[in-house]
Image: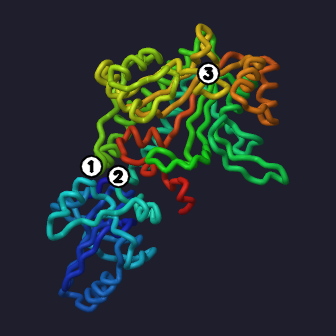
Amino acid sequence: ATHKPGDTIWLSGRLHSIRVKGGSCFLVLRQNSFDTVQACFFKDKEDPDGSAKMIRYLKTLTAESIIQLEGTVVEANVKSCSVQDAELSIQRIHSVSNAEAMLPFLVEDAARSEKEVEESQGTDRPFPRLGQELRLDHRWMDLRAPANNAIMRVQSAICQLFRESLYSQGFIEIHTPKLIAGESESGAGVFTTDYFGTTACLAQSPQLYKQMAISSDLDRVFEIGPVFRAENSNTRRHLCEFTGLDLEMAIDDHYMETLEVIHSMFKHIFEGLETRWAKELAVIRTQYESEPVAFTDEPCVLHWPEAMEILKEEGFDMGDEMGDLNGAMELALGAAVKKKYGTDFFMLDKYPAEIRPFYTMPCPENDKFSNSYDIFIRGQEICSGAQRCHDPDLVVKILEQKGIEAGDGLKSYIDSFKHGVSPHAGAGIGLERVVFLYLGLDNVRKASMFPRDPNRCTP
C-alpha cells in the first residue's frame, strides 16, 4: 500500500542500523533483506520525561533485532534507503526479538563486492574481508545480505520455471525413494547406512526409478529432489548433497525429441529469470557481476568429432579422442562455441560409450559412441543425459563389459524392461550448479542454502 505524508503506520522488520546522539535518534528498518526505510525520533520539549525515557530505550536496541514501530510518514530525502522520498517519525517502538550486541559479522560487510573490499585495502578504513568458512558457519547471517538472499530466491525461481515448462509439455512430478539397495550409478561413491541389518545407500540419482516410471506408463516424468555423492571432491563446483532436477520421457522416433524438450525448458528458465526476477538479478549483480546467458532459439548441438576438432585447434592433445573432457577443455570449448555460434548454452552429443554409465544406449552406427549428451553453460557442464538402453539383454551385456554386478537393486530395474518398455531418454541437472554458473559466482557453495562438502556437515 502507498502511504502519504501524515499517515500513521505500523511496521515490523529488522533493525539494520541505529545512531543515538544527544536528544535525537536515526534508525534504518529492513524488510525482506532488500527494502529499507529510515525512522527518526527527536526530543519533544513538551514532554521531556517521555523523550528521555524513549532515548534510553532506543539506546538499548541492537542491530539485527526484530522490532515493531508505529510512526508518522514525513516527506524526506533519504539517499541511503530504498524508500528515498519519506521517513517515519517514531511514536512507539518495541523490540520483539533482541540480537546479541556482538555479532559474528555485520550484514553490511557481508553485502560488499570483492571489488569494493579490494579497493578499500589501501585506505585508512579498510573493509573486512569475510572468509567463506566464517560466512558458512553463520549462514543465516550471511543470507541476510541482499545479494545472498536474492540468490536463494533465484534458486526457488529456477525450480518454479522448471516445473512450469515441464507441466506445459505434458510431464507429471514423481517422488522416488532416496534409500536404496545397492548403488544407483557405476563409479561414484555412495553413503551407506544400516537398513534393519542389511546395507542400504543414499540415492546418487533417481535414475533407475524414473526409467521404471516409463515402464509404468508414466510417459513423461520429472523430479526435484536431493542427490547424494560420497566423493571426496574439495573443489569450487562439487557438493556431497545437492538438488537434482531430473526428467525422463518416452520417445517416438529419436532422442533429439528430448533435447528439444530440454532446450525449451532451459529457454523458459533463462527468459523467466531475466523478466520475472529482474529485481533479484539486479540486486545480485551489484555484488557478483554477471551477464545474462546468451542462447540460441533452436538447440545448438555439437557432435563429439566436431568438439575434438575444435579442441585440437585450441592446442589440446586429444589422444585417441575417447577420453572424457577435463575442466580446461570444457572452458576452451565453451569459449570457442561462443565465438563460432554466439551462445553460452550448448549441447555436446555422442560421447564415447566407455566413459558413460551402463544404462546409456550405444550409438547404432558405431557402438564405440553412445546416444548421450552433456549440456553446458559458459563452458561448464550443468546437465548430463542420454537415450537409455531399454533392451534388457543389452543392459546385462553392458553391465558384464563394465564389470558391474547386477545386485538386487538392478534385478527389479532389468525386470521392468523384460515386461515391455517404451524407448526413452532423459537428463539430470544440478540445481546449485545452474544457479552458480548462471550468476557467474566463484563457488557453488554460494548457490546452496546450507552446503554439504567433505569437510562440512553443519549447520
Report the residue at 31% width, 81% height from top: 58
Above or below — where is 104 with respect to 316?
below
Which label belongs to residue 158? none
Above or below — where is 278 with respect to 384?
below
Which label belongs to residue 286? 1
Which label belongs to residue 147? 2
Query: In the rendered image, which quarter is residue 413 located in?
Result: top right
User: Is the residue under label 1 in contact with that under label 2 (CB below 8 Å)?
Assistant: yes
Regarding mark 3 in the picture, which secondary structure is present there? strand
Amino acid type at circle 3 is Ala
User: Is the residue under label 1 in contact with that under label 3 (CB below 8 Å)?
Assistant: no
Name the residue nearer the viewer: 260 or 324: 324
In the visual, does 248 lie left or right of 298?
Answer: right
**Whole-percent x and y of residue 420?**
78, 17
Mark 2 vs 1, N-terminal side: 2
**Whole-percent x and y of residue 222?**
61, 31
**Spatial distance from mark 2 to mark 3, Cα to Cα?**
37 Å
Amino acid type at circle 1 is Thr
Which label belongs to residue 425? 3
Mark 3 vs 1, N-terminal side: 1
**Spatial distance from mark 3 to mark 1, Cα to Cα?**
40 Å
Does residue 426 appear anywhere in the picture?
Answer: no
**Whole-percent x and y of residue 130?**
34, 63
Amino acid type at circle 2 is Ala
Regarding mark 1 in the picture, which secondary structure is present there? helix
**Whole-percent x and y of residue 264?**
47, 23
